[in-house]
Image (cartoon, grey):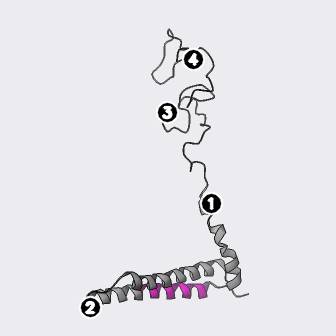
């Protein structure tokens, strides 16, 4: 900031007037007007120019890029193998997940008395009913060609 003009009247919201062009080595300076960026700002508070560098590793990622790992599962091949429409296939997967949840409830929880046993059985019944509902929705959503 050694190149700042000292005698110029300055408003509180304006940056100091630079006597020379902003240097590229100044970290966090706007390339358009040379002002320093506010902490965490994505745009210059003076001219409105966008900050060129990324602020975080997830900045600029689209929501579709978060689902890249699903390509490795190759669910489209499984969908073609079982010959279901997309909505029917999603209901089928939900039914499979509910079946696994019913099995997992029986493995994770153990009954200490009759009330615990009844609660565990009730949870398993609820998961199995959810699986039946999902499979029924899958049957109803299946396209006939």
Quarter of the picture holding the C terminus = bottom right
Q: Residues within 10 Å of mark 3 (few under 14, many from 20)?
A: few
The label shown at residue 18 is 4
Provide the secondary structure element on which disc 1 rests: helix
Q: Do the numbered discs 3 and 4 sit on residues whose CB atoms are within 8 Å?
A: no
The label shown at residue 64 is 1
Which residue is more in the foreground, 5 or 48?
Answer: 5
Give the label, 3 or 2, closer to the camera: 2
The label shown at residue 14 is none
C-alpha gap between disc 1 and disc 2: 48 Å
Give the label, 1 or 2, closer to the camera: 2
C-alpha gap between disc 3 and disc 1: 30 Å
**Magenta-span inclusion, residue 126:** yes
Provide the secondary structure element on which disc 4 rests: loop
For the record, the magenta segment spans 125-140
Q: Quadrant of residue 22?
A: top right
Determine which residue is flagged by label 3.
38
**Dot 3 or dot 4, earlier in sequence:** 4
Q: Do the numbered discs 4 and 2 sit on residues whose CB atoms are within 8 Å?
A: no
Q: Is residue 83 visible?
A: no
Q: Which residue lies at the image location 47% right of the left edge and 19% below the top edge?
A: 11
Horizontal and vertical percent position of residue 133: 50, 86
Horizontal and vertical percent position of residue 130: 47, 84
Determine which residue is flagged by label 2.
114
């Amino acid at each position: 900031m050694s190149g700042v003009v000292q005698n110029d009247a300055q408003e509180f919201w304006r940056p100091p007037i630079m006597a020379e062009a902003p240097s590229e080595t100044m970290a966090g300076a706007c390339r358009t007007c040379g002002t320093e960026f506010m902490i965490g700002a994505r745009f210059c508070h003076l001219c409105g120019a966008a900050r060129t560098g990324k602020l975080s590793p997830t900045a600029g990622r689209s929501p579709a890029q978060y689902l890249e790992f699903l390509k490795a599962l190759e669910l489209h091949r499984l969908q073609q193998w079982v010959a279901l429409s997309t909505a029917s296939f999603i209901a089928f997967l939900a039914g499979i997940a509910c079946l696994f949840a019913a099995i997992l409830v029986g493995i994770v929880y153990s009954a200490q008395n009759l009330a615990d046993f009844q609660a565990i059985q009730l949870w398993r019944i609820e998961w199995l009913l959810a699986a039946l509902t999902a499979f029924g929705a899958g049957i109803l959503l299946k396209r006939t060609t």
